[in-house]
Image (cartoon, helix red, strand yellow):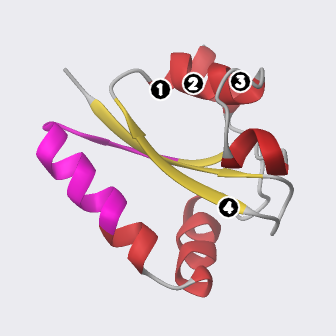
Amino acid sequence: MSYWVYILASAPRGTLYVGVTNDLIRRVYEHREGFVAGFTKKYGVKMLVYFEAHDSIIAAIQREKNIKHWSRDWKVQLILRDNPQWRDLWDEICQ
């Protein structure tokens, strides 16, 4: 089983949200459709701009905590490394 750490954005270089899940497609869909009450719904954070897989939930949760702890600039650099155009990766994960 894979576990996923992901970053959503409200727009390119917009508000960021970092999360962890065992079902990336389901979880991003929930955010996109506004099924998740709270931060992402309130701020319109729906674009999947970064994700990475982990083999264990422990590793994924630790990575999520690390990313959340790091500065916004560091998170932006992480996104830019793999997604310099800030494309919404939703279609990529649904193929």
Q: Are marks 2 and 1 in contact (CB under 8 Å)?
A: yes
Mark sitting earlier along the chain (3/4): 4
Q: Amino acid at mark 2?
A: Ile
Mark number, residue 24:
1
Q: Which residues are magenta?
A: 51-65
Identify residue for label 2: 93
Tell me the CA gap for discs 3 and 4: 19 Å
**Residue drawn at 77 percent across, 57 percent down:** 86
> Residue drawn 52% across and 85% down?
71
Number of residues whose C-alpha sits closer than 10 Å to that of mark 3, classed few (under 14), some (14–19) or many (20 or more): few
Residue 91, which numbered label? 3
The reply to whether dot 4 and dot 2 touch (C-beta < 8 Å) is no
Is 64 located above or below residue 53 in the figure? Answer: below
* Residue type of the residue flagged with mark 3: Asp
* Residue with the mark numbered 4: 16
Q: What is the distance, in whole Å, between disc 4 and disc 1 at their CAs?
A: 17 Å
Q: CA–CA distance between discs 2 and 3?
A: 6 Å
Earlier along the polypeptide chain: callout 1 or callout 3?
1
Indicate whether residue 34 is drawn in magenta.
no
Q: Position of residue 88 (x, y in %)?
A: 76, 41
